């Protein structure tokens, strides 16, 4: 496809999606929720949420076709504003994004090392001590890098970034290979930690947190999109409740909305 054709396609995606949502709303006048829906998620969220959310959709809304799109924060915001996706999990706070958002959770970022490292959940690491470690982080505009850089500025610490990897899978592989350390939420490494492939430790003085919000386009009124947003909240609450997602919820999990 030529560049002109790609630009035309990009401009048409949003309006066409809005027309599709209107058709779906007309169909949804019945009690059954139907239609196509797209959710965008950051790489550090997709592996812990996407599969479980897909199962929930299959069980609770079998006539809904779910599309999961993985992307970095800046891309998700752009796709959401263009109407190419219906909802997205974003880094917060997001008051300046010109999007409708609702708070989801706050979770701590921890220091992650290989199985050969001496990291332990029972031994915290001071943020200033990260300056002496070779770090493996994504590049900007990845939300995780923004969180790390902002924390470093506030703590007046210069981080030593040995590798920049814009693939979440690659980042973990580099850490597993004992080429450096990384900063990630525990939810992003829970499988590797349980398998003994990665070790982790809390970061203190100060702690480093990330906030996640659920974003929708201000013009989105699709019943299917609202149903998906409710399922996202319920699935996150379940993951936190069973300990797969170590976080503090910022919404009432018992609310019917």
Image (cartoon, rainbow, N blue to C red):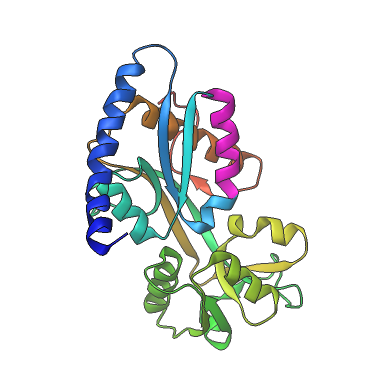
Q: Main secondary structure of the magenta part?
A: helix
Q: The magenta stretch spans which residues? A: 48-61
Q: Nearer the viewer, residue 208 or 43?
A: 43
Which residue appears at 52% of the width and 33% of the height? 234
Residue 182 showing in the rendered view: yes
Q: Residue 77: horizontal and vertical position, in percent?
A: 32, 54
Q: Where 39 sits versus 175, above or below?
A: above
For this view, does 238 lie left or right of residue 102? right
Q: Where 234 sits versus 193, above or below?
A: above
Q: Quadrant of residue 202?
A: bottom right
Q: Nearer the viewer, residue 6 or 29?
A: 6
- Quadrant placement of the C terminus: top left
Q: Residue 208: horizontal and vertical position, in percent?
A: 48, 66
Which residue appears at 43% of the width and 38% of the height? 251
Which residue appears at 57% of the width and 73% of the height? 182
Q: Nearer the viewer, residue 61 or 96?
A: 61
Q: Residue 10: horizontal and vertical position, in percent?
A: 27, 52
Give yes or no for residue 47 being in the magenta stretch.
no
Q: Where 46 sits versus 28, above or below?
A: below
For this view, does 126 lie left or right of residue 201? left
Residue 93 showing in the rendered view: no
For this view, does 85 lie left or right of residue 112? left
Q: Quadrant of residue 38?
A: top left
- Given the current orientation, which residue lies at the most extreme top position? 30
- Given the current orientation, which residue lies at the most extreme front position? 1
- Quadrant placement of the N terminus: bottom left
Which residue appears at 59% of the width and 65% of the height? 169
How many marks overall? 0
Q: Residue 243: horizontal and vertical position, in percent?
A: 65, 46
Q: Quadrant of residue 216?
A: top left
């Amino acid at each position: 496809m030529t560049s002109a054709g790609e630009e035309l396609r990009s401009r048409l995606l949003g309006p066409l999606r809005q027309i599709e949502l209107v058709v779906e709303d007309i169909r949804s006048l019945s009690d059954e929720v139907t239609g196509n829906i797209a959710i965008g998620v950051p790489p550090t969220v997709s592996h812990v949420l996407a599969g479980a959310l897909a199962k929930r959709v299959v069980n609770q809304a079998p006539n809904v076709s779910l599309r999961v799109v993985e992307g970095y924060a800046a891309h998700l915001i752009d796709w959401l504003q263009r109407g190419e996706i219906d909802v997205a999990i974003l880094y917060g706070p997001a008051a300046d994004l010109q999007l409708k958002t609702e708070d989801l959770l706050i979770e701590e970022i921890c220091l992650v090392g290989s199985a050969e490292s001496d990291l332990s959940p029972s031994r915290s690491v001071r943020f200033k001590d990260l300056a002496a470690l070779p770090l493996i982080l994504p590049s900007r505009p990845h939300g995780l890098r923004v969180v790390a850089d902002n924390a470093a500025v506030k703590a007046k610490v210069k981080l030593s970034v040995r590798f920049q990897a814009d693939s979440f899978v690659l980042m973990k592989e580099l850490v597993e290979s004992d080429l450096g350390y990384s900063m990630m939420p525990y939810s992003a490494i829970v499988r590797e930690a349980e398998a003994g492939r990665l070790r982790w430790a809390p970061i203190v003085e100060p702690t480093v947190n990330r906030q996640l919000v659920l974003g929708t386009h201000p013009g989105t009124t699709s019943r299917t999109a609202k149903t998906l947003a409710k399922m996202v909240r319920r699935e996150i609450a379940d993951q936190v409740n069973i300990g797969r997602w170590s976080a503090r919820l910022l919404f009432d999990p018992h609310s019917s909305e």
